[in-house]
Amino acid sequence: MTGWTAKRFWKTATAEPCEGGFTVRLDGRPVKTPAKAPLVVPTRALAEAIAAEWNAQDGVVRPETMPCTRTANSAIDKVRVQFADVAGMIAAYGASDLLCYRAEEPEGLVIRQKTGWDPLLDWAHDTQNAPLKTGIGVIPVPQDAASLDALAQRVRSTTAFELAALHDLVAISGSLVLGLAVIDGRLSAEEAWTLSRIDETWQAELWGEDEEAAESAARKRADLLHAARFYGLCR
């Protein structure tokens, strides 16, 4: 027995202004989220990107090809109604940020981490008022409460739509600093991806990368790039 699959029933999806922002209409009918809430987004650019995804559907609707729609739905149905919890979960990455955990050896990896990550920690110190300490290995590094509070305030200053994007930037990279650097324009998404993969890249250079790992990395990279694009569309 096969599951029910949605099929295209509309001719044209259009982005239009509405109360509270912009929406997408299918032959004049407004799109709703899976929780039946009105799909209202903050910018025309985002609405147009969502409309383009609906217009690109051919026959059977394929949600996996509609990332802007999915993230907007998540922002409305989940992040908006659990904003404090989501913000707290993201802010918690500051206490165990990837950039703070360094290799003791080999020297080449140590240098690569220092060269790539130290400038971002300096940036967090200077622009976020959040100096973070580093340590060797996986032993927890206690961070100053003031630094963690400053990072948490920055996270809480986002909108629900921005927070939905930041969630993926941080969760995929393993670094709150990298995620904030992307949304603040300090790094491109590609730069953040490369910096988040210093350890994996080093290992792949030494031992090679198996096909399954490469496919997983490609999916994560695509998701991170989408999160950065979605954030930009919200602005």
Image (tube, rainbow, N blue to C red):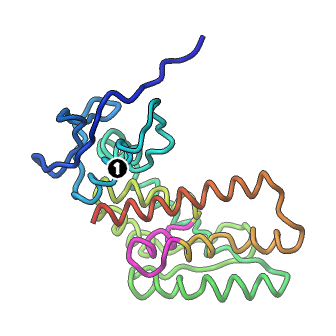
The residue lying at 53 percent from left, 61 percent from top is: 224
Is 177 colored magenta in this rendering? yes
Q: Determine which residue is flagged by label 1.
A: 52
Q: Is residue 136 above or below residue 66?
A: below
Query: Residue 148: percent from the left, percent from the top?
Result: 45, 70
Looking at the picture, tell me which residue is in the foreground, 212 or 135. 212
Describe residue 16's horizontal placement relative to residue 46 as left or right.
left
The residue lying at 38 percent from left, 84 percent from top is: 127
Is 72 colored magenta in this rendering? no
Query: Residue 204: percent from the left, percent from the top?
Result: 82, 69
Q: Quadrant of the C terminus?
A: bottom left
Describe residue 192's horizontal placement relative to residue 80 as left or right.
right
Q: Is residue 182 above or below residue 31?
A: below
Q: Residue furthest top?
A: 1
Total numbered labels placed on residues in the image: 1
Q: Is residue 164 above or below residue 177?
A: above
Q: Residue furthest right?
A: 207
Question: Which secondary structure is most common in the magenta stretch?
Answer: helix
Q: Which residues are magenta?
A: 175-189
Where residue 154 sits, quadrant-wise, is bottom left
Looking at the picture, tell me which residue is in the foreground, 36 or 85. 36
Looking at the picture, tell me which residue is in the foreground, 191 or 113. 191
Q: Is residue 88 above or below residue 111?
A: above
> How busy is the neighbourhood of tag 1: few (under 14 within 10 Å), some, or many (20 plus)?
some
Query: Residue 196: percent from the left, percent from the top?
Result: 62, 70
Query: Residue 121: percent from the left, percent from the top?
Result: 53, 83
Name the kind of residue labelled 1 in the image.
Ala
